[in-house]
Amino acid sequence: MIELRAVKAALKQQSIHFFVDPQWVIPSIIAPFIFTTVTLYLFSHTGGDLLLYAVLGGGVLGMWGNTIQSSSWSIGYDRMNGTLEAIMVTPSSLSSVVLGRCIWNSFIGLLNALAVFLVAQLAFGIDVTLRDPAGFVIALFLTLISLSVLGMVFGAFYVVTRASSALFQMLEFPVYVLSGAVYSLAILPEWTRPFSYVIPATWGAEALKIACFTGYDSLGLGYWGALTVLLISTIAFLLLSLQLFSYLEHKAKVSGTLVRY
Amino acid sequence: MNANEIVISVKDLVKVYPSAARLFGDGGKEKLAVDHVSFDIHRGEIFGLLGPNGAGKTTTIKMLSTLLIPTSGVANVLGIDVTKDSLKLRSRINLVSGGERGLYFRLTGRQNLDFFSDMYQVPRELKRKRSLELLDLVGLTDAADVRVENYSRGMKQRLHLARGLVNDPEVLFLDEPTLGLDPEIARETRALIHKLSEGGMTIMLTTHYMFEADQLCDRLAIISNGRIKGIGSPYSMKEAVRNDTVIEVEAIEISEMQKEQMKALPGVSAISLEVLEGRMMARMVVEDASSLIPTVASLLEGRKIISIRVDQPTLEDAYLKMVSSK
């Protein structure tokens, strides 16, 4: 169950942590810049859509990394801090807390996007003209929410063990590859397609590219079609994460592993 | 307030831990942590769970505060089954653990209290008022807007207590509340616990400090190897060893083998060995000290005995006797 007040409290708490803890500057600000800068150098001799593709790919990868990492690490942080039990003894659900933090992470991701586009435009002089700016912002925000929700799925495993970071490290990069953030899904083997279609970020990336490039529609559903699938798959992953939280919380209460770090 | 009302009722509670935590499947060798424990706690009482490390104290308190699911048995807190209706119970109880962890160090004391007030859905109109009252109660008003990472250990423990009170719980569980605190801060913490109890709050605490249990608890249960060895008031516990005496032997060195030999002597019900600065001290609970002293002296032949004296048993001796019993 999701309690709005707990979601809001967790969002506020995450924002305070963000501003007082300098370590977040690395994944939130520095990493997206590095991704963007490296990609832009690689593509600097190209032009037109391909360069915009580089801005999109580099920036998006950096943002996604931050969003997915901070969301999945949410419970790991409480486990390390010794606050996991203090939260779990309250009437509010752990999933509400994680959701609140995820919303903040998505918001920061959106600010990152703005920063990345400014760097591309001001430092590299790239003409970042989007076909549909409003559609781009909507798709980006929903994609970030979907990645946060994916982070919740990974993060749920932190309830039972700190070793979840290994699982997360293992799954993070396949998500980037399979979602086709930097390149077209067409270059991936046919058998990987079902995995790509299941990941919400695939549809987010599709909607983003449609909003950027004139005539782009690699999955054939159009902007609103891709956004609808993104929304449906995000809700499905949210429900999956809530079920996982419920199952893994029960398991942790049976095995007594909540405080081990 | 009805002091006879039972607010915590525990019957045959058992907790078995699977030995290895795995994501799927329990597997491995099991560990019996709590073994058919039963007791009742009345409203407004301070009830202590006293026992050595690994005795099952924390496991018991975590089952009662809904953080662990019992393997079998029944536990009701405020008439609510801790397993079946844990969500309903949580708004009426709270848990405070000892030690430094369990707070958000990058947040201020006030921000920590605000966050947990929201988690307990404390009415908004009450939230700020209660937060101020609690900071005042634990003496942290001046440090309210200082980040917790800059707090001393004692300040952190006081903030822990304040956090445990944000929802004005009817039952407060305290797990080793004075663990690692210096004597002065520990004394203040005990005074605060006493004050809360006088206000009608039911408090269940775990401790392995004998004097703390003696000073604070209306009643206590001695637990060892997951089993309750005795329940009663500190006075009645001491009464149980009233007819015993204590032999206290100080020597430069007492080996583990000599300790076992002393323990095996007839009439010795418990023994503890303490390492002091440059010497060791064995404390034995015995039926008849005078007849045993020569035997004890002969057992330590070859070791330099500093002193042998006879003492009256304390709560610690009662505890030792119960913990040593099979």
Image (cartoon, rainbow, N blue to C red):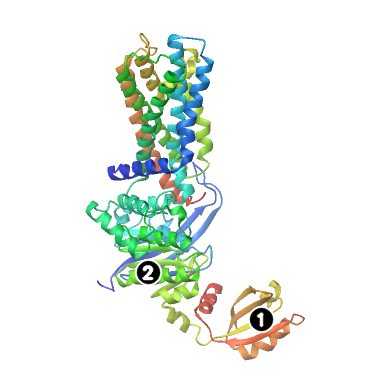
* Horizontal side, residue B313 vs residue B130: left or right: right
Q: Position of residue B139 (x, y in %)?
A: 37, 64
Q: Are marks 1 and 2 in contact (CB under 8 Å)?
A: no
Label 2 neighbour load within 10 Å: few <14, some 14-19, many 20+: some
What numbered label is drawn on residue B191? none
Residue B192's disc is 2
Residue A148 place in picture, x, y as percent? 39, 33
Q: Classify mark 1: helix, strand or loop.
A: strand
* Residue depicted at 24% across the width and 56% down the height: B126
**Which residue is at 28% across, 42% downward?**
A4
Which amino acid type is marked by label 1?
Glu
Up the image or down, B311 lies above or below B161; here it is below
Whole-percent x, y for residue B129 in the image: 26, 58
Which chain hosts label 2? B
Circle on res. B250: 1
Q: How many marks?
A: 2
From the top left corner, tell me how far across and down residue B261 is, in percent.
Answer: 68, 77
Pick whichever, B19 or A54, lies toward us: A54
Which residue is at the front of the view, A136 or A1? A136
Q: Quadrant of residue A13?
A: top left
The tag earlier along the polypeptide, 1 or 2, is: 2
**Chain hosting mark 1:** B
Residue at image point 36% right, 36% down: A104
Quarter placement of the N terminus of chain B = bottom left
Pick the residue in front: A81 or A230: A81
